[in-house]
Image (spheres, helix red, strand yellow):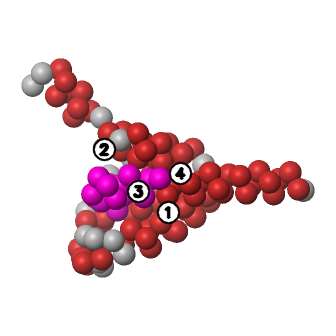
Amino acid sequence: MNEDDKKANTIRWYDRDGIVAKSMNLLQEIPDDLKRQVASYLVDDIINRKPYCDMFPIDTHYMILSEQRRRRWYDFDETIHIFVELLRHASEAQRVAISQMVIDFIETLIETDRIARNEK
């Protein structure tokens, strides 16, 4: 295995695309209540897309729950964990589209929160 192959194997799945990486970084940095709000909102969108709409709930639950590792930042809240696992198993095009939705949603939440804090 050459050095490029080793490097490619150590890159996290969501760092392979700039939009997906940005959405995951934003999601990681926001407060837990906002993480859960973003994940809850977008899980509904993801499970209505292929391949999930064809296999939900049994196969999707199996796929999500088969990941027993709880060491990553998104593993500690079940809703966020489910959202990230659905995102991870989506097609590349869907992952990018959904990640852009994450970015837009988080930026809107942050702006709304900023405005609310200034009004108080």
Q: Say which mark, if any, is on residue 13.
A: 2
Q: Earlier in the sequence, mark 1 or mark 3?
A: 1
Q: Earlier in the sequence, mark 2 or mark 4?
A: 2
Q: Earlier in the sequence, mark 1 or mark 4?
A: 1
Dot in front, 2 or 3 = 3
Instruction: Please tell me which residue is depicted at 41% across the width and 46% down the height of the picture.
Output: 20
Q: Earlier in the sequence, mark 2 or mark 3?
A: 2
In space, the residues marked 1 and 4 are separated at their CA atoms by 12 Å
Give the extent of the magenta segment. Answer: 86-100
Q: Is residue 33 left or right of residue 84?
A: right
Q: Position of residue 79 (x, y in %)?
A: 47, 65
Instruction: Please tell me which residue is depicted at 47% across the width and 42% down the height of the picture.
Output: 22
- Residue for badge 1: 39
Looking at the picture, tell me which residue is in the foreground, 59 or 99: 99
Q: Position of residue 71 (x, y in %)?
A: 39, 46
Q: Position of residue 86 (x, y in %)?
A: 34, 62
Q: Are marks 3 and 4 in contact (CB under 8 Å)?
A: no
- Residue for badge 4: 103
